[in-house]
Amino acid sequence: QVQLVESGGGLVQPGGSLRLSCEASGSTLHDSAIGWFRQAPGKEREGVAGIDLSDEGTYYASSVKDRFTISRDNSRDNAKNTVYLQMNSLKPEDTAVYYCAAGTGFPYGMNYWGKGTLVTVSS
């Protein structure tokens, strides 16, 4: 079983930055992928960024590449990982609920989901 808890959302002005955190715990994480998804009102869920925990390969949606960075904090406790999403140069269209997810592969192999954190980009 995997547990995911997101934090770090909030209100930010256009051009600003936020860092989201996802605390992931669970005994099956070692060879998993963790990703960030977002869903804006009236839109489909979008895979934003993902990281492979086995080789730390990263993946980005074209809409956020060069503005968002996904990274992990290696924990000495192999059952826990913290994954960050650094978001820079934020735009109003980045406004959405951001979800952390884990599974066998990003973006289509996600089996576990957090509850989400709201990011609002507005002046």
Image (cartoon, helix red, strand yellow):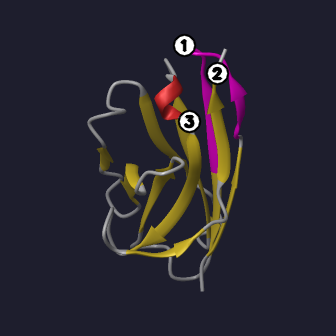
SS for callout 2: loop
Closer to the eye: label 1 or 3: 3
Residue 30 drawn at (x, y percent): 46, 73
**On the image, numbered disc 3 is attached to which residue?**
95
The CA span between labels 1 and 2 is 10 Å
Q: Which residue is mark 1?
A: 15
The range drawn in magenta is 9-21
Q: How many marks?
A: 3
Quarter of the figure with the N terminus: bottom right
Rounded to the nearest whole Å, what is the CA distance between mark 2 and mark 3? 8 Å
Foreground residue among 101 and 77 = 101
Q: Type of residue at label 3? A: Thr
Q: Amino acid at mark 2?
A: Ser
In the rendered view, tell whether residue 114 sits above or below residue 61: below
Using the image, determine if residue 122 lies above or below residue 109. Answer: above
Residue in view at x 54 percent, y 33 percent = 86
CB contact under 8 Å: marks 2 and 3: yes
Please tell me whether mark 1 sits on a helix, a strand or a loop.
loop
Q: Quadrant of the C terminus?
A: top right
Which of the numbered marks, if any, corresponds to residue 122? 2
Q: Amino acid at mark 1?
A: Gly
